[in-house]
């Protein structure tokens, strides 16, 4: 995108009295535009943040020994319950459920906050609204955890960048159950690049 294009679009979209906002372009560069301009709104709506790739996510799950699930629910109809059940039955993770409104999930005690956990988890898996992610990141940083994993369908690009700036590894808009299954033979790794899903393992 040329400077002239940005300038023309900014001028046509908002008056010079508008507050300026820094938006990030797809190529990694950033520019200042009036916050109310159509171009600023369009650029903000586009996803430019890229998290860990498949091999990095595999390494994260392979090296982790403990996972805390924020927003875990005792309701079998909720996706967090389904994911928790899978991880309890199909992984070796030490699981910790965090929900101030529950006392027991899948036969395990539930903690009110991350600060109440008996250890610092390797991964904090999050089932919360996108608008809640910044405050969750603050909690994760406060306890000294290193990885925050934001579940499938939840996206907050600004929060992801903020987390990385504070030293966190951030995975976002990905299901930890699906990723774990793929890396452990439940789903073939080819599914990441080709969209093909299979339960067959390749020869090594």
Image (cartoon, grey):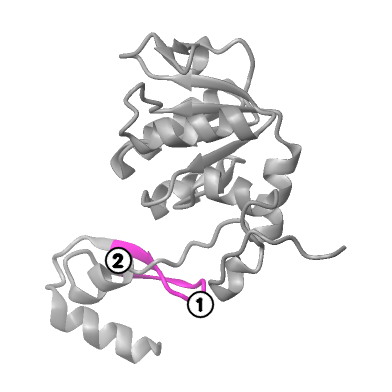
Part of the protein shown in magenta:
21-32
- Please tell me which residue is depicted at 31% across the width and 89% down the height of the picture: 5
Among the 4 quarters of the image, the one containing residue 12: bottom left
Q: Residue furthest front?
A: 200
Q: In this view of the protein, which residue sits in the foreground, 105 or 202?
A: 202
The reply to whether the C-beta atoms of the residues labelled 1 and 2 are less than 8 Å apart is no
Relative horizontal placement of residue 65, taking residue 28 as reference (left or right): right
Query: Residue 138 in the image: x percent, y percent?
Result: 46, 30
- Please tell me which residue is depicted at 84% across the width and 65% down the height of the picture: 203
Q: Nearer the viewer, mark 1 or mark 2?
A: 2
- Please tell me which residue is depicted at 58% across the width and 27% down the height of the picture: 88
Dot label at residue 86: none
Query: Residue 35 in the image: x percent, y percent?
Result: 22, 64
Query: Residue 197 in the image: x percent, y percent?
Result: 57, 65
The residue identified by callout 2 is: 45
* The C terminus - image quarter: bottom right
Does the stretch in magenta take in 27? yes
Few, some or many C-alpha atoms within 10 Å of disc 1 (few <14, some 14-19, many ≥20)? few
């Amino acid at each position: 995108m040329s400077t002239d294009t940005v300038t023309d679009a900014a001028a046509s979209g908002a008056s010079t009295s508008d507050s300026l906002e820094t938006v990030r372009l797809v190529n990694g560069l950033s520019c200042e535009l009036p916050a109310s301009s159509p171009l600023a709104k369009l650029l903000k709506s586009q996803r430019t943040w890229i998290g860990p790739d498949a091999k990095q996510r595999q390494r994260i799950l392979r090296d982790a020994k403990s996972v805390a699930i924020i927003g875990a629910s005792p309701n079998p109809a909720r996706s967090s319950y389904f994911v928790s059940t899978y991880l309890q039955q199909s992984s070796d993770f030490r699981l910790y459920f965090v929900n101030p409104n529950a006392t027991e999930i899948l036969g395990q005690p539930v903690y009110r906050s991350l600060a109440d956990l008996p250890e610092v988890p390797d991964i904090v898996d999050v089932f919360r609204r996108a608008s809640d992610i910044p405050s969750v990141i603050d909690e994760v940083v406060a306890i000294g955890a290193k990885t925050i994993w934001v579940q499938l369908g939840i996206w907050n690009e600004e929060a992801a960048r903020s987390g990385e700036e504070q030293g966190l590894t951030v995975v976002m808009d990905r299901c930890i159950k699906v990723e774990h299954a793929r890396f452990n033979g439940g789903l073939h790794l080819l599914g990441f690049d080709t969209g093909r899903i299979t339960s067959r393992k390749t020869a090594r």
